[in-house]
Image (tube, rainbow, N blue to C red):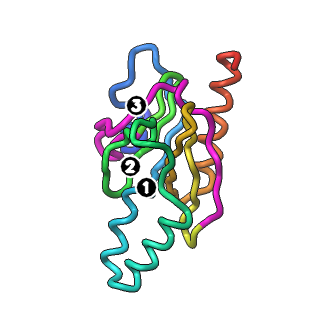
Amino acid sequence: MPEVISVQHQAALCQLAPDEQLLTYGIVVPVKSAEGVKIKHGRIGGMLGDQLMQRYGAQSGGARSIAAAMPPTSGALLMRVTDQRVGLVRHLDGTPVWEVPRTWVAHVERRPRLQLMARFRVHYADGSWLAFLTARRRTIESFTTALSNADSAAGR
């Protein structure tokens, strides 16, 4: 009997190179795209959303940074970590949204939780970072483990 895998797992495996290995994946929401949520909650929600973005930030780095290269997105995406790349793909069909070479990622930093969502930052080699939200703290731990194991395996 064939192994049954989830839609998200299929999406994470989509368009990998023949010798590329999937290390982990999880559903995330880029904080940059979470700004759109504030419109649904009216003026107060908008003001609160603006304050959260200013206080906690969605990204750092100049216009030519790795983080600034991420295109505008909306809604949840699948972040996948392979032995070669780290990136975002659509969680239903695996269409790549944005990916960078694994060597461009420095580390993952867990941040203080905001209500129901766990928050983390992906730091890049040029010093820039992007913030993400996820429903599970385990997702952050999985990314941290996969990225630190990739560093160990590469002798970094």
Q: Is residue 24 left or right of residue 42?
A: right
Q: Is residue 76 above or below residue 147?
A: below
Q: Which comes sooner in the sequence, label 1 or label 3?
A: 3
Q: Main secondary structure of the magenta part?
A: strand
**Within the magenta stretch, is there residue 90?**
yes
Secondary structure at numbered mark 1: strand
**Amino acid type, mark 1:** Val
Residue drawn 43% across and 72% down? 50
User: Quick one: 1 or 47, which is closer to the camera?
Assistant: 47
- Whole-number angstrom distance, CA of label 3 to CA of label 2: 14 Å
- Whole-number angstrom distance, CA of label 2 to CA of label 1: 6 Å
Label 3: few (<14), some (14–19) or many (≥20) C-alpha neighbours in 10 Å: some
Secondary structure at numbered mark 2: strand
| Residue 28, horizontal then vertical, whole percent | 46, 52
| Residue 115, horizontal then vertical, whole percent | 57, 72
Secondary structure at numbered mark 3: helix
- Observer-side mark, 1 or 3, equals 1
Q: Quadrant of the N terminus?
A: top left
User: Quick one: 95 or 122, which is closer to the camera?
Assistant: 122
| Residue 80, horizontal then vertical, whole percent | 47, 37
Q: Confirm or deny contact between disc 2 and disc 1 (CB under 8 A).
A: yes
Label 1: few (<14), some (14–19) or many (≥20) C-alpha neighbours in 10 Å: many
The residue segment tinted magenta is 88-113
Q: Which comes sooner in the sequence, label 3 or label 2?
A: 3
- Observer-side mark, 3 or 2, equals 2
**Amino acid type, mark 3:** Leu
Q: Is residue 8 visible?
A: yes
The residue that label 3 is drawn on is 13
Q: Is residue 101 left or right of residue 16?
A: right
Q: Is residue 4 visible?
A: no
Residue drawn 53% across and 44% down? 129
Question: Of the numbered discs in the image, which one, if any, rests on residue 77?
Answer: 2
